[in-house]
Image: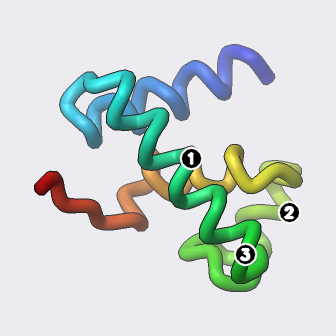
Amino acid sequence: MVERLEKVVAQALKYVDGDNYLLAVLVSKRAEELSQNGIGTSFLSKEFIRSKSLTRNTDIALYELAERKVAFTIS
């Protein structure tokens, strides 16, 4: 599982141009949205979430970023 998670983090880091801080902020904010609105609002399919055994909002948010399902702007 650790190796697989490292690959997901690496994919997500590519999406944010290697900015660890930005990735942490985006995962945190998206996880908070999922917490408030429910996992049903995820951009990932329920089948994908089940197949990866994702149970925490932070894991779902990280996968959403790695899969480029979440758009963001820097202001």
Tell me the SS state at disc 3. Answer: helix
SS of the residue under disc 2: helix
Q: Is residue 49 left or right of residue 25?
A: right
- Amino acid carrying mark 1 in the image: Ser
Say left or right for 64 vs 11.
right
In-front residue for pair 40/10: 40
Q: Are marks 1 and 3 in contact (CB under 8 Å)?
A: no
Identify residue for label 3. Answer: 36
Which corner quadrant of the image does residue 70 belong to? bottom left
Alpha-carbon span between mark 1 and mark 3 = 12 Å
The secondary element bearing badge 1 is classed as helix
Amino acid type at circle 2 is Arg
Q: Position of residue 68 (x, y in %)?
A: 36, 57
For the view shown, which residue lies furthest in the top direction? Answer: 3
Residue 1 place in picture, x, y as percent: 80, 23
Q: Nearer the viewer, residue 20 or 65?
A: 20
Q: Earlier in the sequence, mark 1 or mark 3?
A: 1
The residue to which callout 1 is attached is 28
Which image quarter: residue 2?
top right
Task: Point out the tag, 2 or 1, that comes first from the N-terminus.
Answer: 1
- Label 2 Cα crowd, 10 Å radius (few <14 / some 14-19 / many 20+): few
Residue 50's label in the rendered image is 2
Between tags 2 and 3, which lies in front? 3
Question: Up-down: is 9 above or below 66?
Answer: above
